[in-house]
Amino acid sequence: MVLFCILFKCKHVSFQNKKALYALTCETLRYRKPVLEIAAECGVLKDKRLRNDDNLVAVLMYEHLLGKGVSGKYKVMLHKYKNAIHSRCERIKIEQGVTDLKQALQKLLPSHVADKPLPKYVRINTILGRKEYVMRELQKQFELREHSRSVSMTECDSGDWFIEDEHIPNVLMFPSSTQLHNHPLYLSGKVIIQDKVNYAETAC
């Protein structure tokens, strides 16, 4: 979460679209291994214009394969490898038995970064309800845990518990399977369900 803190907690950071940068970085890190393997097999990693910068190559390859595409001088550079990259990606899809490249690459991810259920984030709407009241009501149904480090990845998809987010005030984390849409706090607007990154601007 170091990047998250830099982007959303540091006042002097002035990226125009912090959420987009954060999302791109997270996705690039997730797919870093397979996209770099494709880059190596197709000769992209050896291109002198990239100065042996694996991090730059990972970003470019992710954007080229799964993102919004590459522009400028790097688009021209990658065009040289277009056919080789396309052929390799088609072979990967055939090998993995799918027609979607993202699904194929997901199957190549290391087990510790493969798709796992994401936790559910809830923001306390302090305009409609005091934090103390919301926390008290939630603890009638859920166990309040002290710290996120006490929660393993295998627990993130089930269980009757929640924790306070370490980075953003008034944001709580629940297991992904938690159903809150019929909870009185949600129905009354005292809590709001969203992805964590959507709360980021309130943390600046």
Image: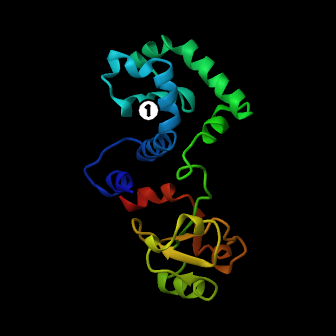
**Residue 28: image location, x then y, percent:** 47, 39
Horizontal side of residue 153 vs 203, given as left or right: right
At numbered mark 1, what does the secondary structure look like: helix, strand or loop? helix
Instruction: Say which amino acid is labelled 1.
Output: Ala
Residue shown at 57%/50% (left/top)?
A: 111
State the residue in front, 44 or 173: 44
Screen quadrant of the C terminus: bottom left
Which residue is located at x 42 percent, y 56 percent? 201
Which of 92/8 is in front?
92
Above or below, 191 against 25 in this view is below
Rendering coords of residue 126 (x, y %)? 49, 75
Dot 1: few (<14), some (14–19), or many (≥20) neighbours within 10 Å? Answer: many
Q: Answer whether residue 70 is visible to the viewer in this image.
A: no
Disc 1 target residue: 58
Left or right, residue 101 beside residue 31: right
* Residue 15: x %, y % from top left: 34, 42
